Image (spheres, rainbow, N blue to C red):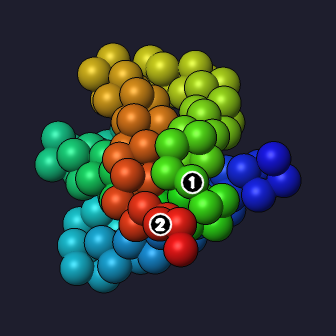
């Protein structure tokens, strides 16, 4: 159980590191997105880019959770649920700033793509 919880927490931490690194690269490659001062000024391509960065982070986090816990489903789902629990309250505060589809895509993708990432972990085989 300790490995499962530790894996889930590690998966959420990996998500944050991944989106930070990917976000940095996006801002270097796309100066217009770096110049945006308020999130409400994001264009449709910028919103899709942010969702893509989060998607890659969720997959990486799910994979890390599964590898750390030694099992592919529960730890990766746990990482996604931890992220979801943290972001639902925040998204309610910014609900009117973005289209509903953006919020729903982001929130649903956290646990879903974390599980996808967990499925990428190799299966343990008994000796």
**Residue at (44%, 53%) from the top-left corner?**
118
Picture coordinates of residue 96 (x, y %)? Answer: 44, 18
Q: Is residue 39 left or right of residue 11?
A: left
**Residue at (28%, 22%) from the top-left corner?**
101
Q: Secondary structure at mark 1?
A: loop
Q: Which residue is at the front of the view, 127 or 92?
A: 127
**Residue at (59%, 26%) from the top-left corner?**
88
Residue sitting farthest toward the right: 2
Picture coordinates of residue 115 (x, y %)? Answer: 43, 43
Residue sitting farthest toward the left: 45
Asked if residue 69 can be seen in this view, the reply is: yes
Q: CA distance from mark 1 to mark 2?
A: 11 Å
Q: Secondary structure at mark 2?
A: loop
Check disc 2 and report the residue beneath it.
125
**Residue at (29%, 63%) from the top-left corner?**
33
Which quadrant of the figure has residue 80?
top right
Position of residue 123 relative to residue 52, above or below, is below
Query: Dot 2, crowdedness within 10 Å: few (<14), some or many (≥20)?
Result: few
Q: Earlier in the sequence, mark 1 or mark 2?
A: 1
Position of residue 35 relative to residue 86, above or below, is below
Check disc 1 and report the residue beneath it.
71
Which quadrant of the figure has residue 57?
bottom left
Position of residue 90 relative to residue 123, above or below, is above
Q: Which residue is at the front of the view, 90 or 118?
A: 118
- Residues tagged 1 and 2 counted as in contact (Cβ below 8 A): no
**Residue 86 image label:** none
Q: Is residue 100 left or right of residue 5?
A: left
Query: Dot 1, crowdedness within 10 Å: few (<14), some or many (≥20)?
Result: many
Q: Is residue 7 left or right of residue 14?
A: right
């Amino acid at each position: 159980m300790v490995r499962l919880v530790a894996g889930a927490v590690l998966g959420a931490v990996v998500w944050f590191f991944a989106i930070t690194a990917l976000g940095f690269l996006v801002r270097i490659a796309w100066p217009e997105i770096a110049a945006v001062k308020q999130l409400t000024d994001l264009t449709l391509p910028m919103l899709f880019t942010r969702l893509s960065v989060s998607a890659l982070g969720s997959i990486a986090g799910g994979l890390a959770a599964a590898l750390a816990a030694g099992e592919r489903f529960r730890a990766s789902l746990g990482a996604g649920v931890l992220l979801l629990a943290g972001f639902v309250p925040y998204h309610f505060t910014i609900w009117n700033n973005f289209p509903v589809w953006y919020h729903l895509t982001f929130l649903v993708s956290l646990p879903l793509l974390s599980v996808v990432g967990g499925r990428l972990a190799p299966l343990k085989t008994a000796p």
